[in-house]
Amino acid sequence: MNRTSNMATTETFTVRTESDVIHNLDQMAGSLDRSRNYLVNQALKEYQQHHAWPIEKVTQGIVAADRGELVDHDDMMRELEELIDEKAKSQA
């Protein structure tokens, strides 16, 4: 069995950051018995997971707006007020 077939291809890149960030990262890595590289990769993956959904939604909204699929501001505010009122009533 070829063990490398399941491994992702990696690339090297350089990041400049403040010295205290590097110092804290190195302390965390030592405490967790992990490499700096491992922690940076985990942080990048978490960042991507956290930010992918909102970025995709904004992109979809821009595409829809470019197609002319817009909602009038007053209509949207009215709908939001109705949702807020419904929520308030259900919690009372």
Image (spheres, grey):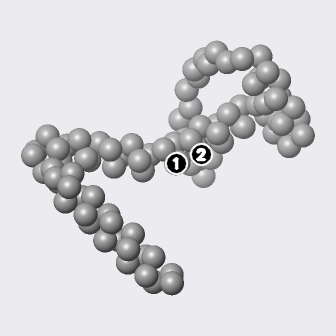
Q: Position of residue 64 (x, y in %)?
A: 18, 47
Packing grade of label 2 (10 A; few <14, some 14-19, many >=20) is few
Q: CA distance from mark 1 to mark 2?
A: 5 Å
Q: Is residue 15 above or below residue 64?
A: above
Where does label 1 land, which residue? 49
Where does label 2 land, which residue? 46
Q: Position of residue 60 (x, y in %)?
A: 26, 47
Q: Please name the residue shown 79% across and 21% down the image.
A: 20
Q: Position of residue 82 (x, y in %)?
A: 31, 71
Q: Position of residue 48 (x, y in %)?
A: 51, 42
The image quarter in which residue 34 lies: top right
Q: Residue 50 versus residue 35: which sits nearer the camera?
A: 50
Q: Is residue 36 left or right of residue 81?
A: right
Q: Is residue 83 left or right of residue 9?
A: left
The kind of secondary structure element at disc 1 is: helix
Q: Are marks 1 and 2 in contact (CB under 8 Å)?
A: yes
Q: Is residue 24 left or right of residue 53?
A: right
Packing grade of label 1 (10 A; few <14, some 14-19, many >=20) is few
Q: Please name the residue shown 90% across and 40% down the image.
A: 31
Q: Is residue 29 above or below residue 46?
A: above
Q: Please name the residue shown 62% across and 19% down the image.
A: 15
Q: Is residue 53 above or below residue 29?
A: below
The kind of secondary structure element at disc 2 is: helix
Say which amino acid is labelled 2.
Glu
Q: Residue 27 versus residue 79: which sits nearer the camera?
A: 79
Q: Please name the residue shown 14% across and 40% down the image.
A: 66
